[in-house]
Amino acid sequence: MTATVAAKVASIGAHARQAIRDGAAGELAAVFERCCYVTLDGNWLCIGTPAIGRGPLHMIFQPRQAKWPRRRGAPACVQQDLLRIDGIVLDLSRAAVWRPQMPSGWSRESLAYGLAALDALVARGLPEDGLACLMRDAVVARPAGLIAQAAQAPVLELQRLMRTDAREQACAASARKATLLVPLLGLGPGLTPSGDDLLGGAMIALRAVGRTDLCAAIWDAIAVPAMSLTNDISRAHLAAAAGGAGCAALHETLNAVMTGRVERIADGVRRLAAVGHTSGFDALAGAVIVLRAVPASGRD
C-alpha cells in the first residue's frame, strides 16, 4: 500500500493503544467531519484532529494538506507502530498514551463545595435537548423534554442503587435491580445517544468515588442488551466507561468538582459543552447524579 500522507500521532488513549498490535487488521468503519472510526480485530478506535480532545479510544493527529481518511470500508492494518488506512499512514511510535487521572484527596466537604459551585454555574442555563436537566434533580418535577421524561424512572433507580452499601450490592437482588437501567440504552438521537452518555458518565463517577461494585453491576446488566439496543460505536465508549475512562473534559470537570477546585469547573463545563451535540452535558448529568448521592451511599 502506498502512503500519500504520513503523520505522527501525538496522543492515543490507553484503550486504543492496546488495539494497535502488529498484524491487526480491519477497516474504516465510519467517517465524520472531525473524526473517523476504525475497527481493528473488533476493537473500535476514533481518529481525529486535536479538536476532538483526548479520550480512551482517541488517536489524535494533525492531517497534512487537509488529507483525511474518507473512503468508508477501506482496509486498515497495523505494521509495527504504523497504522495504514485509505492511503494514509499514521506513525504511533512516539504517541503519548493518555489515561484519565483519578481524583485524590477529596472529601464530602470538598465535594459539597464543588457541587454547589457547579449548580451556580449551570443555573445560568442548560441545553434543552438531551438529559442535562436531570443534573439538577430528577425527583423534583416532571422534565419538559420527552427524552428526559423517558429517562426519569431509570435515573431514579440509579439514585436508589446509590443508597445501598457495597455489601448489599453483592447480592443477586441488587444486580437484578441494575437491569432497570436498560431503558436508557439507545435513548435519544445521535452517534452516542443521550441515555448511553448518561450511563457512561455515571459509571465513570462510580469508579471515581470507589463504588466499583455498583459500576460492575451496571455494566453486567447492560453489556449484553447494549449489543442490540445501541450502536457499536456507542457500546465501545460504554465499555471504556465501565473501566472508568471517558473524555478528558469529563474527568477534569469531575476532579475539579470532587476536590472543590471551583476555579477549574467553568473551564471544564465549557469544554464539555463542545463534546457532541449534548454528549458532554449528558455524561456530566450521569456523573452528577452519582456524586449527589455520595453522602447517602455511606462513604466517609
Image: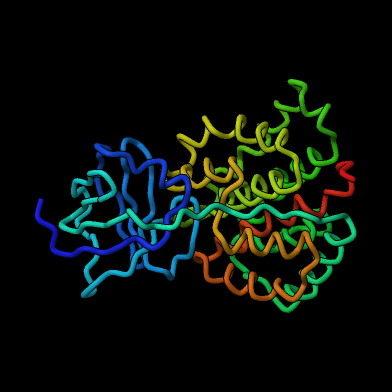
Q: Nearer the viewer, residue 194 or 284?
A: 284
Which residue ends up furthest to the front in the rendered image? 94
Percent position (x, y) of residue 182?
A: 61, 37
**Residue 127 position (above or below residue 36):** below
Side of 15 where 144 appears, left or right: right
Residue 297 visible in the displayed image: yes
Instruction: Please identify the quarter of the rendering in which residue 9 is found.
Output: bottom left
Q: In the rendered view, how is the structure colored?
A: rainbow
Judging depth in this view, the residue of 203 and 144 nearest the camera is: 203
Kindly tell me whether residue 146 is visible in this rendering: no
Name the residue: 70% across, 63% down. 133
Q: Position of residue 201 (x, y in %)?
A: 63, 52
User: Farthest residue toward the top?
Assistant: 172
268 is higher (above) or lower (below) than 183: below
Q: How many marks?
A: 0
Residue under the image location 77 percent in, 21 percent down: 171
Q: Nearer the viewer, residue 109 or 197?
A: 109
* Residue 285 versus residue 168 in the image, above or below: below
Which quadrant: the C terminus? top right
Q: Residue at x 64, y 75 (%)?
A: 267
Answer with left or right where residue 71 lies relative to residue 129.
left
Q: Give the x, y percent position of residue 90.
A: 26, 57
Q: Position of residue 216 (x, y in %)?
A: 65, 33
Which is more toward the observer, 39 or 95?
Answer: 95
In the image as oriented, which residue stretches furthest toward the bottom? 124
Which quadrant of the figure has residue 143? bottom right
Residue 61, quarter of the rendered image: bottom left
Residue in view at x 66 percent, y 59 percent: 284
